[in-house]
Amino acid sequence: MFDFLRKQFVDVIEWLEQPGDIAWRVPFADHEIQHGAQLTVREGQIAAFLNEGTLADYFGPGLHTIETANLPLLTNLMNWDKGFKSPFKSDVVFFSLKEQPGLKWGTAQPITVRDAEFGALRLRAFGSCSYRLNEVAPFASRVLGTMAGVTAASLEPQLRGAIQTSLASALGGSGIAFLDLAANQQALSDRIKAEVDKAFAQWGLTCLSFYVESISLPDEVQAHLDKASSMRVLGDLGTYTRFQAAEAIETAAGNESGMAGLGAGMAAATALGGAMAQGLGAQGLGAQGQGAQGLGAQGAGAFPAPAPAPAAPVEDPVAMIEKLHKLVTIGALSQDEFDAKKAELLGRIR
């Protein structure tokens, strides 16, 4: 008796939707709607009457009175007269036509594509998109069915699967090299959106926006690509190695304790010795030549003449000054010693 009385007072039908709601079936007792009930449909909504799962009549935004006169399809299906005053035996479902933003998508597994430059590549992609309900009939039959409602969260797994399939088709047929994807990201997004639209249409949905936020390689492949890029940036590896060695000496010299300070001192001494040897090489060779002549005068045939030492490579005086200045900076050479050697090296420049 209470249920009978309760359903007699259901005379206002409306839906206060929450963010993420797409469809909601009004829970009437025994699916009976009172004749003369008031139906309120707000902007961005549409109300549909379903008779045994078949869509009958639609109502757009506004206030509607439920009578046989404004339900021609439903009245015809039920063979009702226009003066029929008994409750309507039907379902009322509200559908939201608003945009559903912020759907995040990504590739669960890398997609293998043929790249114009690197050959076969496995790519990962991530981004976001938005969509909305476009056609009620396919959505009601293929998605809603007999459920009490549908939310964006419940649709996400199904939509992500469709996006991944569309993504593979778009990337595989784009013909854009991986290194050029960043410059063509908007064109790629538009191409994928067209594929996604085709997939969404089967559920009565339309894709309003689609963004590719990043496309990346697997970590091990990216590491090799970064290494190759570093090699191209460095250019002359010999110059880079010498620079790194000088930096290491300076860093070690800053540590006055332990093996680091000892190693810095040894490195500085070695560098200073090499610089002095190169600077005095010519004088040593001249003295050795004079000694050889004297020995030859005393006994030319007594002893074989020693083989001449190979001439030391002559280094650029400017480069030598830079090295010596480095030794002054780290404390391995005094300023006076540097000034004297600098004057000597500058004297060689003609």
Image (tube, rainbow, N blue to C red):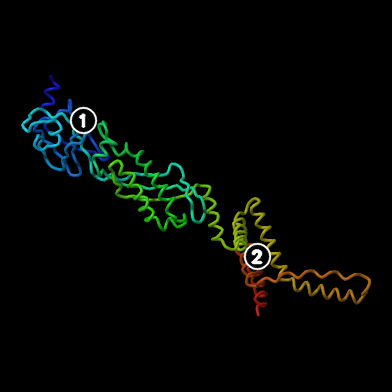
Residue 330 appears anywhere in the view: no
Indicate the position of residue 20 as horizontal and vertical percent values. 27, 40
Residue at the extreme top: 1
Question: Is any part of residue 279 visible from this angle?
Answer: yes
Q: Residues within 10 Å of mark 1 (few under 14, many from 20)?
A: few
Asked if residue 143 is positioned above or below residue 182 in the image, the reply reads: above
Q: Residue at x 63, y 68 (%)?
A: 335
Position of 89 relative to 175 (above/below): above
Q: The residue tagged with tag 1: helix, strand or loop?
A: loop
| Amino acid type at image mark 2 | Leu
Q: Position of residue 77 (x, y in %)?
A: 15, 32
Q: Nearer the viewer, mark 2 or mark 1?
A: 1
**Crowd tier of the residue under label 2, counting other residues whose Cα lies within 10 Å: few below 14, some 14–19, many 20 or above:** some
Q: Is residue 305 above or below residue 125?
A: below
Residue at x 36%, y 44% (from the top left corner): 104
Q: Earlier in the sequence, mark 2 or mark 1?
A: 1
Horizontal and vertical percent position of residue 208: 29, 49
Disc 1: which residue: 52
Q: Position of residue 264 (x, y in %)?
A: 65, 57
Q: Tag 1: residue type? A: Glu
Report the front residue among 56 and 92: 56
Residue 333, numbered label: 2
